[in-house]
Amino acid sequence: MVLTQQGRTKLNILPDREFYAFPRFVTHVDDRFISNLTNLYGKCLRPEFEILDLMSSWVSHLPQEVKYKKVVGHGLNAQELAKNPKLDYFFVKDLNEDEKLQFENCSFDAVLCTVSVQYLQQPEKVFAEVFRILRPGGVFIVSFSNRLFYDKAISAWRDSTGYGRVQLVVQYFQCIKGFTEPEVIRKLPSNDDQENKSPLSKIMQLIGLLSASSDPFYAVIAYRNFKPVHE
Ligand SMILES: C[S@@+](CC[C@H](N)C(=O)[O-])C[C@H]1O[C@@H](n2cnc3c(N)ncnc32)[C@H](O)[C@@H]1O
């Protein structure tokens, strides 16, 4: 196991379903983050793929112009998921109560988890389930930034840094035998970003309507190995 009992704790101990009971029709990261993610999906995912978007909401970060064979959504708020234009169908389930995914082994070519991994209290078990439902060669893409619902993130995440959080997700992958060595992608805001901002953006920053820097982009990716685990 990667986490200690203490590392799994949350400040808000009410059931997650209650926290997500009302829909939040907002985007959780900025346009630059979303464009990095959509580009990554464009490179890693093919139209013939069957995809599970784990811990999803009303927005999809999949490339708009691509029609995938099947996209299944999962999350905690049915109203949000019903609005997601990319989902063929969806289901609601609290993964901190029960991490089992009701799919046959080897059902998906890709599983996605966007800006949500920090809310999992049993990530090792969820990653094992993702491994089980991925086809050999299938990809799991976990992306995140530095924003979070602080009270609902696990302590190991809250108390960490950008570097530490990447390491944590790498370890979640590494504790499941059969994933390839995780690949890490980091796109951090630079000083140039600030200089290239429009005058309007700079004024909005000054009066506090826009945050000063863009959201850092992190993605950790691994594939289900073709080689059976027992060999
Ligand atoms: C910050 S939102 C991100 C939503 C979406 N992935 C996106 O990119 O907009 C976090 C999501 O994690 C999901 N989530 C949080 N706790 C969960 C839990 N215990 N079980 C299942 N899903 C959970 C909720 O559905 C929520 O929509």
Image (cartoon, rainbow, N blue to C red):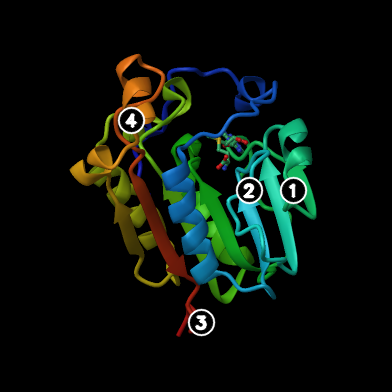
Instruction: Spot the residue most to the top.
Output: 207
Say what secondary structure mark 3 lies in: loop
Q: Position of residue 47 (x, y in %)?
A: 67, 73
Q: Amino acid at mark 2?
A: Ser
**Which residue position holds label 1?**
85
**Local crowd at mark 3 within 10 Å, few (<14), some, or many (≥20)?**
few
User: Could you tell me which quadrant the C terminus lies in?
Assistant: bottom left
Secondary structure category for the residue under label 2: loop
Q: Which label lies toward us, 4 or 2?
A: 4
Per the model, the C-alpha gap separating discs 1 and 3 is 36 Å
Using residue 189 as the reference point, say whether residue 17 is left or right of it: right
The percent coordinates of residue 11 (x first, y second) are: 43, 18
For label 4, the SS is: helix
User: Residues under labels 1 and 2: Cα distance?
Assistant: 7 Å
Mark 4 residue type = Pro
What amino acid type is highlighted by mark number 1? Pro
Looking at the image, can residue 2 be seen? no
Q: In the rendered image, which residue does mark 2 sit on? A: 60
Residue on which disc 4 sits? 199
Ligand 1 neighbours mark 4 (CB distance < 8 Å): no
Q: Nearer the viewer, residue 78 or 159?
A: 78
Image x and y of residue 27, in percent: 55, 34
Name, please, the residue furthest toward the front.
199
In this rendering, the answer to whether 104 lies above or below 227 is above
Q: Nearer the viewer, mark 3 or mark 4?
A: 4
Q: Are marks 1 and 4 in contact (CB under 8 Å)?
A: no
Looking at the image, tell me whether mark 1 or mark 2 is earlier in sequence order: 2
Q: Within 10 Å of the Cα at label 1, are there few (<14), some (14-19), or many (20+) other Cα atoms?
A: few
Q: Position of residue 75 (x, y in %)?
A: 66, 40
